[in-house]
Image (spheres, grey):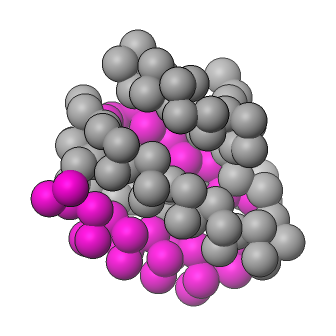
Amino acid sequence: MNIKQIKKNGSLIIVLSGELDESMADYTRKNMDKIILDEGASNVIFDLSGLSFMDSTGIGVLLGRYKIIKKLGGKAMITGANKQIDRVLTMSGLYTIMEKIS
């Protein structure tokens, strides 16, 4: 798992690459929490274009970060999901609370 952060137009973009499954959940969670809290970002975009696989564990990771961002008064968005990941996100209902952007 590789996690990169980019600040652009007042938003924090967190770019994830690799696989987001149970074996990488703790690492991903801790690193994203640090980035979000250190930046104090109100708008966070999760760029999933580099993810090759994500299971339901990844949904939990994203949902937890959404809750932190919401407490900070911010907005969380998702972009770049491949077909398999997009399907997981759609079936989970995550797009009902986190906007899907192109």
Q: Which of 10 and 52 is in front in this view?
A: 52
| Residue 52 lies in quadrant | top left
The answer to whether one can see residue 17 in this image is no
Residue under the point 64% across and 60% down: 66
Q: Please say whether residue 21 is one of the residues in the magenta stretch.
A: no
Q: Is the magenta stretch mostly helix, strand or loop?
A: helix
- Judged from this view, the residue extending furthest toward the top is 83
User: Residue 48: image x %, image y %?
Assistant: 43, 37
User: Residue 75: image x %, image y %?
Assistant: 78, 56
**Magenta stretch bounds:** 22-51
Q: Nearer the viewer, residue 65 or 39?
A: 65
Residue under the point 21% across and 43% down: 19
User: Residue 77: image x %, image y %?
Assistant: 68, 44
Q: Please say whether residue 23 is one of the residues in the magenta stretch.
A: yes
Q: Is residue 62 left or right of residue 16?
A: right
Residue under the point 70% across and 53% down: 76
Q: In which quarter of the image is the C terminus?
A: top right
The answer to whether one can see residue 72 in this image is yes
User: Residue 83: image x %, image y %?
Assistant: 41, 14
In this view, 77 is above or below 37: above
